[in-house]
Image (cartoon, rainbow, N blue to C red):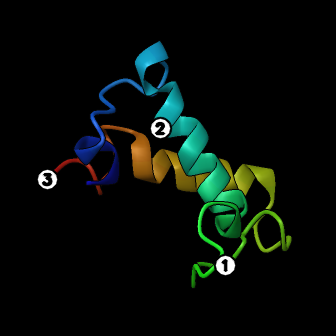
Amino acid sequence: QYGKLRGVSDPGSAAAQPILRYTWGKIYNSKAYNACSGMPRFGHAGLLNEEQMRHVMALLLDPRSPVNSQ
């Protein structure tokens, strides 16, 4: 319920943009937000390409996603 808990009901809305930027940055380079983060730097380290990171963002933020439908 990542997106739901953060109030993202429409990822395309202007109100959702700060959450989208934060989430993208956290996925791309988690160390930018917390130097001691145990989360991998998916984009920075080349573990995921841009399309794969977009899919992760959709999973986390799309209201129709299984993680937000409960």
Q: CA distance from mark 3 to mark 1?
A: 27 Å
x then y, percent, for residue 10: 37, 23
Q: Is residue 2 left or right of residue 19?
A: left
**Secondary structure beneath disc 1?**
loop
Residue type for callout 3: Gln
State the residue lying farthest toward the top.
Answer: 14
Question: Which image quarter: residue 52?
Answer: bottom right
The answer to whether 11 is drawn above or below residue 55 in the figure is above
Residue 61 found in image quarter: top left
Q: CA distance from mark 1 to mark 2?
A: 19 Å
Vertical comparison of 4 with 36: above or below: above
Q: Nearer the viewer, residue 61 or 51?
A: 61
Mark nearer the N terminus (1 vs 2): 2
Residue sitting at x 50%, y 45%? 58
Residue 55 location, x and y as percent? 59, 51
Frontmost of labels 3 and 1 is: 1
Element assignment for label 2: helix
Mark 2: few, some, or many residues within 10 Å (few <14, many ≥20)?
A: some
Instruction: Name the image quarter holding the N terminus.
Output: bottom left
Pointer 1 residue: 40
Q: Which residue is mark 3?
A: 70
* Crowd tier of the residue under label 1, counting other residues whose Cα lies within 10 Å: few below 14, some 14–19, many 20 or above: some
Marks 3 & 1, CB-CB < 8 Å contact: no
Real-space CA distance between mark 3 and mark 2, rounded to the nearest whole angstrom: 20 Å
> What amino acid does circle 1 point to?
Pro
Judged left or right of residue 27, residue 65 is left
**Can you identify the residue that label 2 sits on?**
19
